[in-house]
Amino acid sequence: MKVVEIFDSIDGEGIRAGAGATFIRLAGCNLRCTYCDTAYALFGEDEPCVYEEMTVDEIVKKVNPRYKRVTLTGGEPLVHKDCRALTERLIENGCEVNVETNGAADITDIPRGGGLFFTIDYKLPSSGMTDKMIWNNFKNLTPRDVVKFVVGSDEDMEQTVEIVKKLKAIYDVMPHIFIGTVYGMYDAKKAVSTILTEDALADARFQLQMHKIIWDPNERGV
Ligand code: SF4
């Protein structure tokens, strides 16, 4: 598998925010979001990507046994054909695995159960990728999974409300809903105000990307 980096840090967002985890960042992505902050993990003419070829075994050995929490990220981890084998091995080893995925890669091939959950990003209009969302992914979640919205404009905020309404019509017990803002692009106060006033968002949680506050926003491996 093409691995950009493996490092230990705290999860910067989502249901494990603040908890130590081993991050496995795989190379390549099937999207090109306008605000991508991990261009170094993408392939393209102007996007040199430095990676190391590693086997599933080699990757699994790098997981810190102290906390056995793994965040599998990218790029888009699910574009790798060995992602299924990797998640299976991590689960067998007793890890809790957070698969961060972009909503445009089929999640149904990854076996559920054990400690695996998805944090799935619903790409809103300001990403330029909203038409790539696979709705089937969002219809097959469990209460353990997370749907994340990263808001960069008023239009994004309006669409977030509409999508959460659609999800509420599907689920008796909803996946977790997290709402954040594109760093430096949308007023966090405005997003919070919408969460506090829109009925559909009554159970949504606002989040800031903690790692961008603790460290330099462009720092890698943190
Ligand atoms: S899905 Fe993530 S990694 Fe891929 S282009 Fe968008 S922001 Fe970047």
Image (cartoon, rainbow, N blue to C red):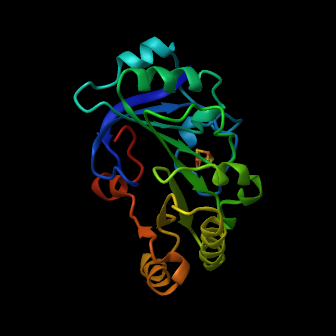
Label count reads 0
Question: In which quadrant of the rendered image does the C terminus lie?
Answer: top left
Left or right for 127, reference 201:
right
In front here: 46 or 193?
A: 193
Q: Is the residue 151 above or below the residue 82 in the image?
A: below
Q: Is the residue 201 above or below the residue 130 in the image?
A: below
Q: Quadrant of residue 170?
A: bottom right
Q: Residue at x 65, y 69 (%)?
A: 169
Q: What x and y, as percent, mark residue 213?
A: 32, 59
Does residue 134 show up?
no
Q: Is the residue 166 above or below the residue 67 in the image?
A: below
Residue ranking furthest to the bottom: 197
In front here: 179 or 172?
A: 172
Does residue 14 show up?
yes
Left or right for 180, reference 17:
right
Q: Is the residue 87 above or below the residue 71 in the image?
A: above
Q: Residue at x 63, y 73 (%)?
A: 165
Question: In which quadrant of the rendered image does the N terminus lie?
Answer: top right
Q: What x and y, as percent, mark residue 17?
A: 33, 53
Left or right for 130, reference 88:
right
In front here: 21 or 94?
A: 94
Q: Residue at x 61, y 48 (%)?
A: 102
Q: Residue at x 56, y 36 (%)?
A: 41
Q: What x and y, as percent, mark residue 25?
A: 48, 33
Residue ranking furthest to the right: 131
Q: What x and y, as percent, mark residue 192?
A: 43, 79
